[in-house]
Amino acid sequence: MPKDTGIGAPVTRTEDVRFATGKGRYTDDFTCMGLHYAYFVRSPHAHAKVTGIDKSAAEAAPGVVAVYDGHQLTGDGVGNLICGWGITSKDGTPMNMGAWSALATNTVRYVGDAVAVVIAESLEAAKDAAELVDVTYEELPVVVTVADATAAGAPQIHPEAAGNQIYDWEIGDEAATDAALASAAKVVEMEITNNRLVPNPMEPRAAMAQYDAGQDHLTLHTTSQNPHVARLVLSAFYQIAPEHKLRVIAPDVGGGFGSKIYIYPEEIVCLWAARKAGVPVKWTADRTEAFITDAHGRDHVSTAKMGFDANNKIVGFKVDTQANLGAYMSLFSSSVPTYLYATLLSGQYNIENIHCNVKTYYTNTVPVDAYRGAGRPEACYLIERMMEKSAKELGVSPAELRRTNFIQEFPHQTPVIMAYDIGDFNATLDAAEAAADVAGFAARKAASEAAGKKRGIGYSCYIEACGIAPSKAVGSLGAGVGLWESAEVRVNPVGSVEVLTGSHSHGQGHETTFAQLVSDRLDLPMDSIKIVHGDTDTVQFGMGTYGSRSGAVGMSAIHKALDKVENKVKKIAAHVLEAAESDIVIEGGAVKVQGTDKQMLWHEVGLAAYTAHNLPDDMEPGLKEGAFYDPTNFTFPAGTYICEVEVDPDTGVTTVENFTAADDFGQVINPLIVGGQVHGGIAQGVGQAMLEHAVYDADGQLQAATYMDYTMPRADDLPMFKVSTHETFCPGNPLGIKGCGEAGAIGSPPALVNAVIDAIGTDDIQMPVTPQAVWKAIHG
Amino acid sequence: MATVSMTVNGKAVSGEIEGRTLLVQFLRETLGLTGTHVGCDTSQCGACVVHVDGEAVKACSALAASCEGAAVTTIEGMANADGSLGTIQKAFQDNHGLQCGFCTPGMVMSAADLLKNNPNPSETEIREYLEGNLCRCTGYHNIVKSIQAAAEAGA
């Protein structure tokens, strides 16, 4: 029976029943007695001094219980927001971090920076009163881009960061790379931008804070990918409450893509205000608020040089990147353009010499942090655009140039920290070329041309790093947290199983895939297994879900706990059945003595553990085991994406005709869910490549702050995708999993842009390759 | 405040509203039917689609007062009488047509409207019809497959 629900089976999701019937419970669906609503007064200016806040009219408005400002917040000892990953500049100095208060006090630094909050009986009353808060601003000159930030005499955004520079970091051997480039037979150069994006999970962020005065205890319902990390940071750094007096619940969460990792000002303010005002407080972002407060992604400008020898082997790769980190340093912002980016610059290729210099800057824009892929899409876009450009300049096919340079032997130590454990890059390239019918492309191109259209094909051979990562390693690189995961497996006296996991599902389907692991190991039906997550009072601890880590790290923790459960079950059964432990097997809902008819039914073992009437002398009662799993290395998903487009030269409109993905994710737990992750990732990557752009004007106003202006991919922008997986099992974790959550968003942008460049015959174009950009590139 | 009365999922309901109360607020806050979601402020995302007198309507863009006497169906009214998943809902589960689930109620309601008016839509017709529903998780691939499967099952 349960084998069709085990590892590798395309099990339909159990959580779908509640989601498809409207019974999911997201943060905004929760309510409580006496609930009040928060509405934030936000700066309309990108950079200004706050010279006065007159709250009196708002305080007197109907239904208003309180209006608070930043001076009250800091006066109550609420700490500034932190960045949890310290980066050291190449001169040995620590990064320059400016202060960030959850409610701005004397200076606002981006449009959307909150200066006050109104707490009222209804949302309408709070909104109405917010209009009565009279904030006087003295406008300051504005910095929007890295070019603005680095210009002579640029306005200073934070006194701590001279020249608006946060750090000037490097990786690799610059002298050796320069020498390699100097000796190269051919050097290819390019300038490349990686456009700023807004993550846009469909559920806007929300928070509901309740204070129980009798217990002196706070409860926060929030849209978090990592509720325990939220509790830790809220307690340790923002002094909201000690951890044992703060419960964080992240119930059903409607997508995250990185943007719900961070602990934002709104959560801090709701908790503080709930205690201060003595009423429960809920805040839910409207969509424009999400656009101007959710951490943005990407926003790099780079120059790159790649050198080749006479045999088209890469001899050196040198990259200079400038990254715009926005007005404040978000929680993991510093790690994205450094350890999550430059460490992947070797791509799938054998490159002896790599050097990358990264300079990051403050600007008067929304803070930038990890968004699906986080650093790896930026690295992949750079490398894979470079490979395609180099192939054209060297006069070889893009596939051939890649094959010439593929890493073939594993493990492989790159010159930029990463040690690739396993992979088969030729296998995924072969599979993608076959599935994409590359052989038939010439005929399809001819047909397009006959119809007055231009057709192009583009490749991307991506590699990324997931699981993040061995705690000791990330600690040595500046991380403020460990990146292990925890699990507890409880077998109840009636035999049902509860798994408490520190991973958090916000669309990934953990309730199904994690149960498949248990079903596989204990040979039990899915409906006897429950996966519990998202509540700090229920789950022991956890680091949460991001970096495609829930399979490779979260499930490895469950696997370890299951080892302990299995061990104890076998000991109990051996004792009761008077057999050798080595003869005990778990199968078919029973625990059996191999080769005999002696057995205990599964629930009888559970009952035996809890009645404790007949256990081995040295055994504790109960059947519940926990484990912490710390990864031994990053994991390295890799693959090839091939995109085929048709461009209408008259309008510049690009149509994605075919998109083929061949991925190596290691062990696949559920192919249905893995396919869905790839589809969604590709859609976001195609969105970045041809539709999405968080455009600011020179005054620092976000021009794309609604769905009328920010071009989200819609159903009619995309084709059906051809996806397949080709597994080399990850040797670094017990299940052989690599992770599949981000690959689609990492691998797809260069495939699409390379295809458009192939179609139009010029590479003088940057993302997003909108109809206007394509038309201009064609017609000049 | 005024009183509005309508039929929601076959049940007669009424409640106090302000003139500015939106249908989606009435459904979520007054009736506690939180399956209808709000994903934007510009009637672009479609997470709030319900049926009013048999027509698909974005509940964020309709005043509750304008639905006086109307028959409203929400996602909570789409399951079979025995509580099991309706044909479209089942097709979404079978084809992994949902991930985080936030857009799903609107997608199911839109799909039902499409299939009522066009029982055998082509892939292109499905994609064009879904222009008013955003999903950030699925890349639409499996949503299209789900609707094709629902059409085949006679939804």
Image (spheres, coloured by chain):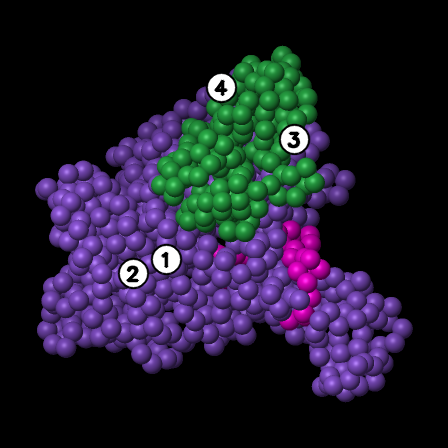
Chain colours: A purple, B green
| Residue A638 in view | yes
Cα distance in 3D space between marks 3 and 4: 31 Å
Residue placed most toward the observer, B130 or A71: B130
**Where residue A344 sits: x, y (%)?**
33, 65
The label number, if any, that marks residue A132 in the structure image: 4
Asked if labels 3 and 2 touch by Cβ distance under 8 angstroms, the answer is no
The crowding category of the residue bearing disc 3, from other C-alpha atoms within 10 Å (few below 14, some 14 to 19, many at least 20), is: some
Which kind of residue does numbered mark 2 sit on? Ala
From the viewer's perspective, is the residue at label 1 or at label 4 nearer?
1
Q: Chain of mark 4?
A: A
Asked if labels 1 and 3 touch by Cβ distance under 8 angstroms, the answer is no
The label number, if any, that marks residue B32 in the structure image: 3
User: Which residue occupies 17% across, 51% down?
Assistant: A447
Q: Are marks 2 and 3 on the same chain?
A: no
Tell me where residue A48 sits by quadrant. Answer: top left
Whichever of callouts 1 and 4 sits on the residue coming sooner in the sequence is 4
Query: Which residue has dot 2 on it?
Result: A436
Q: Chain of mark 1?
A: A
Tell me where residue A556 sits by quadrant. Answer: bottom right
Q: Chain of mark 3?
A: B
User: Which residue occupies 46% across, 45% down?
Assistant: B148
Q: Are marks 3 and 4 on the same chain?
A: no
Which kind of residue does numbered mark 3 sit on? Gly
User: Which residue occupies 55% across, 49% down?
Assistant: B93
From the viewer's perspective, is the residue at label 2 or at label 4 nearer?
2
Q: Secondary structure at mark 1?
A: strand
Image quadrant holding the N terminus of chain A, namely: bottom right
Which is the main secondary structure of the residues drawn in magenta?
Answer: loop
Query: Which residue has dot 1 on it?
Result: A722
Q: Which residues are magenta?
A: A521-549
Whichever of callouts 1 and 2 sits on the residue coming sooner in the sequence is 2
Cα distance in 3D space between marks 2 and 4: 60 Å
